[in-house]
């Protein structure tokens, strides 16, 4: 037995994040770890990687008790982690970040660093982009791939993957799951934290279900029923909302003509993009990350200069769910209520005389907790005290509270469990049903197909399409071809 955990316990502010969790992991196996947001998955990964200290319980490594007090202790055992949010040094290049983690000489030559990254990327089948590009210029998905290369740049005996597929396209997910299988076959033990049940079933030999800090189910994945696993995660059956047809009488809320951006860093400039969004309509943009998604979102919300024109209904303007909640959506040390008011319009509504009473902050947090089923120690909790999925719910709650005419939703269900994702989908559909317009940017083709009335594929800065819903097999095949950069009829 490589790793055994016995009766692990951890509480925050009196609330149990883990309660007597026990499991084992053998070399050459992969364990899928699933559960609703706030179930304790990231806490468990933190204990195994040395960033979180348990309140009780024991860990055994190859039959001997071990104390993993810091990340260096985990690394010494061969435990590597790919965190939910990258820890790259933004000003360092891809090659420099990987070299820093790989143990190369203190001052390696640039050519040596570049060769190391390219060889490792080819071996794993993961494209990190330009090895000489600074990581701060990369898209979220590309940074995730660099983080995986970092983790595997040194000998690994146990790999912890904390939601690694959240911002990857179907093709990239397939490549990553193939890496997991190859690592398992080479004798590495893998723990895969994931909300997508089909990925866990495909890549893992066993699956463990956490609910409210307790291990409620563990079984082999062969023949596992996704519906049964979903019920075990959230305690009830999950129903996906249905997309209604777009209304016949529609008002154009957002009109984009010949949108073109300049090249900045390693980004992909937008090239003469034209589309419109009507009231009651959801327009989806999918594609391999790094093909203009970031540029599109930033241009639409006014964070990037552009040529061409963007005309928006001025009744309530635009609100956005940014693609990276930690870097662009939250202040981790601020309370939930404070984060819910990080918007000029909402702040002016709540504090017309320039003073925001603490009661207003608590009331806003309590309302968000109730509406979006946010799991938190209380309405005064800081954002950093919440799991990643619950942080995402704060960002979504703030965007919808503004009651905009147009919602720009980038990776809106990143890090959310199946029940929470279905809830967010219902909110987006309800927003459109009430006359709003939605620009949905997501690497998840299933999400795009389920929600969007029209679909564009972003490829090298161009919008290809549209494809009209519902998407049939031919449309799905054409979208896949366009995402790969090929031509379609």
Image: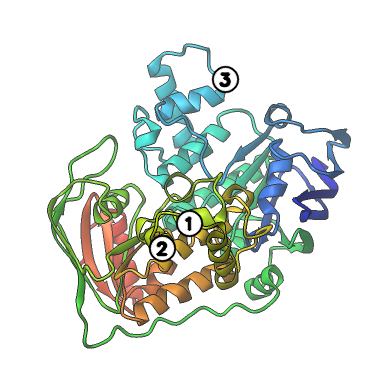
Frontmost residue, 193 versus 403: 403
Which class describes the residues within 10 Å of circle 2: few (<14), some (14-19), or many (20+)?
many
Q: Is residue 74 left or right of residue 178?
A: right
Residue at the image point whose x is 35% and y is 52% from the top: 288
Residue 143 coordinates in the image, percent (x, y): 44, 40
Q: Which residue is mark 1?
A: 356
Q: CA distance from mark 1 to mark 2?
A: 19 Å
Q: Is residue 409 above or below residue 69?
A: below
Assign a secondary structure to mark 1: loop
Q: Is residue 125 visible?
A: no
Task: Residue 205: give its label.
Answer: none
Residue at the image point whose x is 48% and y is 32% from the top: 120
Answer with mark 2 or mark 3, whichever residue precedes in sequence. Answer: 3
Assess whether mark 2 and mark 1 are in contact (beta carbons under 8 angstroms).
Answer: no
Residue 487 coordinates in the image, percent (x, y): 21, 59
Q: Residue furthest front?
A: 353
Assign a secondary structure to mark 3: loop
Residue at the image point whose x is 54% and y is 52% from the top: 177
Answer with mark 1 or mark 2, whichever residue precedes in sequence. Answer: 1
Q: Which residue is mark 2?
A: 399
Coloration of the structure image: rainbow
Q: Which residue is mark 3?
A: 103
Residue 226 coordinates in the image, percent (x, y): 63, 71
Q: Is residue 104 visible?
A: yes
Assign a secondary structure to mark 2: helix
Q: CA distance from mark 1 to mark 3?
A: 50 Å
Which class describes the residues within 10 Å of circle 3: few (<14), some (14-19), or many (20+)?
few
Answer with mark 1 or mark 3, whichever residue precedes in sequence. Answer: 3
Disc 2 vs disc 3: which is toward the camera?
2
Q: Is residue 229 left or right of residue 312?
A: right
């Amino acid at each position: 037995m490589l790793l055994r955990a016995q009766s692990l316990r951890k509480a925050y502010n009196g609330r149990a994040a883990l309660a007597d969790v026990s499991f084992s992991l053998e070399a050459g196996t992969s364990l899928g770890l699933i559960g609703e947001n706030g179930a304790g998955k990231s806490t468990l990964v933190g204990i195994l990687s040395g960033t979180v200290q348990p309140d009780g319980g024991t860990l055994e490594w190859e039959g001997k008790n071990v104390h993993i007090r810091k990340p260096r202790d985990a690394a010494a055992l061969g435990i590597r982690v790919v965190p939910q949010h990258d820890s790259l040094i933004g000003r360092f290049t891809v090659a420099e970040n990987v070299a820093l983690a790989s143990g190369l000489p203190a001052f390696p030559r640039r050519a040596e660093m570049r060769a190391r990254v390219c060889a490792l990327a080819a071996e794993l089948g993961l494209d990190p982009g330009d090895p000489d590009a600074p990581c701060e210029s990369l898209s979220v998905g590309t940074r995730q791939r660099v983080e995986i290369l970092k983790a595997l740049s040194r000998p690994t005996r146990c790999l912890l993957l904390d939601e690694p597929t959240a911002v990857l396209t179907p093709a990239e997910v397939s490549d990553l799951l193939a890496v997991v299988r190859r690592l398992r076959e080479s004798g590495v033990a893998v723990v895969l934290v994931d909300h997508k049940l089909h990925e866990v079933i495909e890549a893992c030999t066993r699956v463990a279900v956490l609910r409210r800090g307790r291990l409620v189910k563990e079984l082999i994945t062969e023949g596992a029923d996704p519906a049964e696993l979903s019920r075990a995660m959230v305690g009830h059956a999950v129903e996906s909302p249905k997309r209604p047809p777009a209304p016949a009488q529609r008002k154009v809320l957002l009109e984009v003509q010949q949108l073109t951006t300049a090249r900045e860093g390693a980004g992909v400039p937008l090239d003469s993009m034209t589309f419109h969004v009507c009231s009651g309509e959801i327009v989806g943009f999918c594609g391999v990350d790094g093909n203009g998604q970031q540029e599109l979102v930033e241009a639409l919300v006014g964070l990037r200069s552009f040529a061409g024109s963007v005309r928006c209904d001025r009744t309530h303007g635009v609100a956005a769910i940014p693609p990276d909640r930690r870097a662009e959506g939250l202040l981790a040390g601020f309370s939930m209520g404070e984060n819910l008011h990080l918007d000029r319009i909402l702040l002016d509504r709540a504090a017309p005389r320039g003073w925001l009473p603490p009661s207003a902050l608590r009331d806003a947090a309590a309302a968000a907790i109730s509406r979006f089923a946010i799991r938190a120690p209380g309405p005064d909790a800081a954002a950093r005290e919440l799991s990643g999925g619950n942080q995402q719910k704060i960002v979504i709650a703030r965007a919808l509270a503004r009651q905009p005419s147009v919602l720009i939703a980038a990776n809106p269900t990143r890090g959310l469990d199946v029940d929470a994702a279905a809830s967010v989908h219902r909110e987006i559909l309800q927003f459109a049903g009430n006359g709003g317009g939605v620009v949905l940017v997501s690497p998840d083709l299933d999400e795009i197909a389920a929600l969007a009335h029209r679909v564009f594929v972003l490829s090298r800065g161009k919008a290809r399409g549209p494809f009209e819903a519902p998407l049939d097999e031919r449309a799905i095949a054409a979208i896949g071809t366009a995402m790969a950069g090929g031509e379609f009829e």
